[in-house]
Amino acid sequence: QSVLTQPPSVSGAPGQRVPISCTGSSSNIGAGYDVQWYQQLPGKAPKLLIYGNSNRPSGVPDRFSGSKSGTSASLAITGLQAEDEADYYCQSYDSSLSGYVVFGGGTKLTVL
Amino acid sequence: QLQLQESGPGLVKPSETLSLTCIVSSGSISSSSYYWGCIRQPPGKGLEWIGSVDYRGSTYYNPSLKSRVTMSVDTSKNQFSLNLNFVAAADTAVYYCATGMTLTQVDLWGQGTLVTVSS
C-alpha cells in the first residue's frame, strides 16, 4: 500500500465541486514537506497540477486549488468539467529510511 | 522548452538488467537548477518513484529498489540513465523520465516507455 492514502475514486456532476484527500503521517506531510498534485489523463503522462501545497503552474486553471493541514492535504476542483475526468496523484517526501519521494495511490475522478 | 525522451528496450528477460536512457533536449543536463529522475507505473496501477540524480551526479534512490538501481548523468551526451538489475515480472511498467526544480516536484515528464519483463 502507498505511504500517502487517497480515496480510490470520486465522482461529481458537471459544475460541481469535488475534493480529493491525501492523508500522510508525521514523517511526510506532517513533517512539513510540500505536497504536489498531478493529473493523468487516460493514456497520457502525468502533468503537474499543484506544487508547494497550493501553487498552480502557469496554464493550470484556477478551478484547481490545493491546501494542506497537519498530516493531510487536499485537492479541490470547482466547476467540474468533462475534461477533468482523469487520475489524480498526490506526492510528497518521507523522511524515514534515509528519505525518499512518495506518491499516493491515485484517485480516479469520474464526471457524471 | 526542455524536453525528455525515453529510450528503452521494450522487452527484458527475467534476472537481466533493464537499461533506460533519458535524452534531454532544448536544455543542459549540467544545469544546477534541476533534478533528473525516473518514475514507473505498472499497468493499471499507481506511480512509483525509482530515483533521481542531480547535475553533480549525486543520487537518491527509493529504499525498496536501492539494492538494484543505479542512475548516472552523461553530460557529454546530455542524457541520464537508469539501470535496474535482476528484473522480474513485477518490474513490468511504463517507465517515465522526469525532471524538476526540487527532488520531489516533477515539472516535466517524458512520454513514457513500456518495458515488459518476460522470457
Image (cartoon, helix red, strand yellow):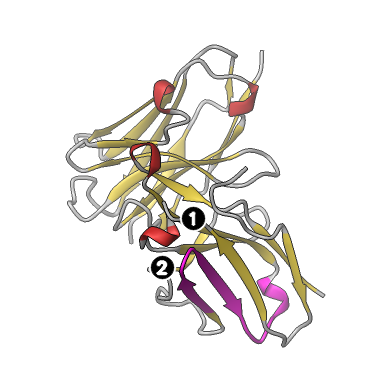
Question: Does residue B107 appear in the picture of this structure?
Answer: no
Q: Amino acid at mark 1?
A: Ser
First to last magenta residue range: A65-84
Question: How many residues crowd around disc 2 within 10 Å: few (fewer than 14), some, or many (20 or more)?
Answer: many
- The image shows residue A10 at horizontal and vertical percentages of 74, 68
Judge whether B32 appears above or below A58 on screen. Answer: above
Q: Amino acid at mark 2?
A: Tyr
- The numbered disc on residue A25 is 1
Q: Residue furthest right?
A: A112
Judge whether B15 appears above or below A28 on screen. Answer: above
Q: Chain of mark 2?
A: A
Task: Find numbered disc 1 in the image and state the secondary structure of the residue it sits on.
Answer: loop
Q: Quadrant of the N terminus of chain A?
A: top right
Q: Chain of mark 1?
A: A
Specify whether residue A70 is painted magenta: yes
Closer mark to the observer between disc 2 and disc 1:
1
Q: Nearer the viewer, residue B9 or B16?
A: B16
Cβ–Cβ under 8 Å for marks 2 and 1: no
Which residue is at 51% across, 61% downward? A47
Task: Find numbered disc 2 in the image and state the secondary structure of the residue it sits on.
Answer: loop
